[in-house]
Image: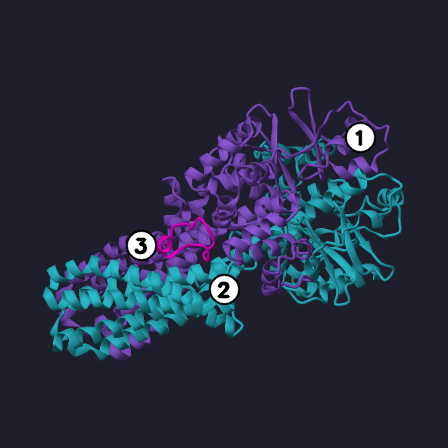
Chain colours: A purple, B cyan
Amino acid sequence: MSLSRGIDHTAIEDLIRRREWRSLREYLQGLPVPELADLLTELEPAQRLLAFRILPRALSTEVFSNLEAPHQTAVLEGLTDDETRQLLADLPPDDRTEMFEELPGEATQRLLNLLSPEDLAEARHLLGYPEESIGRLMTPDYLAVRPGWTVARSLEHIRNRGRAKETLDVIYVTDERWRLIDELDLRLFVLARPEQTVEELMDFGFVSISAFEDREEAVQLMRRYDLNVLPVVDSGGVLVGIVTVDDVLDVAQEEATEDFHRVAAVAPLRQSYVDTGLRVLYSKRVGWLLTLVFMNLFSGAALAMFEDTIARAVALVFFLPVLIASGGNAGSQAATLMIRALAVGDVRITDWARLLLKELGVAAALGLTMAIAVSGIGLFRGGREVGITVALTMFCVVMVGSIIGTVLPFLFNRFRLDPATASTPLITSLADISGVVIYFSIARWVLEL
Amino acid sequence: MSLSRGIDHTAIEDLIRRREWRSLREYLQGLPVPELADLLTELEPAQRLLAFRILPRALSTEVFSNLEAPHQTAVLEGLTDDETRQLLADLPPDDRTEMFEELPGEATQRLLNLLSPEDLAEARHLLGYPEESIGRLMTPDYLAVRPGWTVARSLEHIRNRGRAKETLDVIYVTDERWRLIDELDLRLFVLARPEQTVEELMDFGFVSISAFEDREEAVQLMRRYDLNVLPVVDSGGVLVGIVTVDDVLDVAQEEATEDFHRVAAVAPLRQSYVDTGLRVLYSKRVGWLLTLVFMNLFSGAALAMFEDTIARAVALVFFLPVLIASGGNAGSQAATLMIRALAVGDVRITDWARLLLKELGVAAALGLTMAIAVSGIGLFRGGREVGITVALTMFCVVMVGSIIGTVLPFLFNRFRLDPATASTPLITSLADISGVVIYFSIARWVLEL
């Protein structure tokens, strides 16, 4: 990239100390917005507020949008009511909604009280949609024209009303009741003759999404149809907002991160790892760890059931770790493949039986390979009977682990849980318990032959 | 979404059987491109070719771009040389490059021979960049203007040359040696007075990326700066292409999928799970599984070292599964948090020491909680000595597991491997081995007291 990331902090602190406001302002204005936001988070609170206040109004709003929630709260606490009201009025509605979401309750209340009645209505309106729905992501900053208008009139409308809008790449066509009937690229208006009507440009081909849909659906739609903007409609087909691809790119990343964490048995964090404190990290991890401790105690209990078998052939114990781990590993592979394929829409819930069949085929081949690999070592370390037991067990645990790994994500989905709840540690624990039972059952049977 | 996904296959097969070509063509033309592509993949080969040939030329190209690689190969095999040449000429350059990438070697050769000399040069040019680099992702379909031009002349240029371009949302400004000096939204030209010069609109603020950078860098840049299009420059700052956000959205998803698979010890698949055959699925999984088998044998060997300790207190064995699993689980959580934070750019490689300190804090709290949870059960099942041993071990394995999980992703990166190579099964295996040693060392020490 062509931007240099090194910003001279001491120079800025120097300018503040020497009260050279004009130079400071000029220096800050010259920085790209994301760098400026990073810089502010790194200054100490008093200096941060000073630097923030010295920025031109439009720029300070942009910088504020780029701050993470805790830093936004810190800045807000330092501002006067008037400054806050001005800032809120300038923020794009979707950024404002997102900020309200992440603020502590009392701060939200204080801010809502500062909003003008119209803005308040809009914020409430945006907040009325379910969490993680499209309604929370959309912005009402779009432009619409009517089918009967000429291209010249449309361009005039765009010129008059377009400056404040978030994106003008797509212009929407609505009927008199504001129902969406088409979308047209801005370039079509530029390329057309001025006297053509909007109707002549229309092809009635567009993809829209309901405001109540899950935001993940927008990611899938925009990927599938290669879209940069997606119009949002209510149940009556009325255009209520748009979702832009840059917001969706963030959503896609957040959703992937949540899935990553779930697969490792970490409850989704609400912020980046760096911004998450020790206490939150502890609380997001301890729940599953304790649950798994109690599940793993069952493996111990299963072991206790086979005390006499163990006593007859202690050498069996030495193969226990590799056998139960292999079942868990094969299961984790299968589960992760399913979870990701479900998340990106490659497979559907109803495909489970077909996928299980495919996984059984792969698991059989994997189990056979691994059984051959350990049989020699079993033979060498514990004799013929241990060799046979170890090889048979390896094949069985890989099969059982793969079945657990394949079926569990679908099962969780059936009970309205995220498929990624079938985490690797959970699969491993289940494979451990079944591995212990399979191993010593086979051992008892072989030893009794 | 407002599109119905149900397409009547039998109706299409009927139309083909009854040779009603006009109705078939009309029906197919009415479908959205992604649905049409899906439909083609579901028809049998002869019918697929027929349906593909009947489409208007522009539409067939679009549909072809939407097919997955194996289906593209199948269609290509059925086409005549002339039909293939026409199709290749119509494909957007980036889609063409992507297709060449995924075709078997001999098919690529045949296709390259069919290309016109100019197209061949372009394909080779695009192919000259390293795999997964921006150069492979970019398209040369953009429009550039000069600073001295008026808005009117620029719009004239856009009208004349803009129809074939992939995106016109951003117009680039270059100097006489084609070096990029600014980028301007198309809307600025629409909103400006015709007699203004391009120079008056310019703000010299833009973000560009080198053609040799990794494609993941484009994801980060476009997310960070909320961009829809990113200009690509060579080492001399000359504009060589653009990257659009819809391609980047695909890249982001593919990279996340690769990481998901790596974390579960699956080598990255090159296609979607559904399109991957049993043999490939086997080969992508067996390598790590066998490696882990041999690693897990060390856990068994470690157990054998403590044979006399085990003989003195068999009850110890029953706590083995829960203790070694807990170390692995805590380690997997830590590793996944690190891997994801590194992938999305939240933390940098150089942060490792600071992050290790933070993780140690969390791990200490987690270890303490879990030690308390198991100590009671240890006391009840095996007496005071076992209770103390189990609690002490739990604390230690959680600490050691967390350290392994935190450090390993950074270590792999140091040796130029993907941090996600620190997979959950690998962490679990390492935690198992160290868990066995820690457990029985503590047990021996406590029993000897």
Q: Label 1: how many residues lie within 10 Å, few (<14), some (14-19) or many (20+)?
A: some
Amino acid type, mark 1 = Glu
Q: Is residue B281 visible?
A: no
Where does the magenta region start and end?
A265-282
Q: Secondary structure at mark 2?
A: loop
Q: Is A117 placed above or below B339 here?
A: above
Q: Is residue A269 magenta?
A: yes
Q: Which mark is residue B267?
A: 2
- Image quarter for residue A58? top right
For residue B386, side relative to residue B61 (left or right):
left
Question: Which circle, 3 or 2, is nearer the viewer?
Answer: 3
Q: Is A193 placed above or below B216 here?
A: above
Q: Which residue is mark 1?
A: A156
Q: Magenta region, mostly helix, strand or loop?
A: loop
| Residue B140 percent location from the top left of the image | 77, 55
Q: Which residue is mark 3?
A: A286
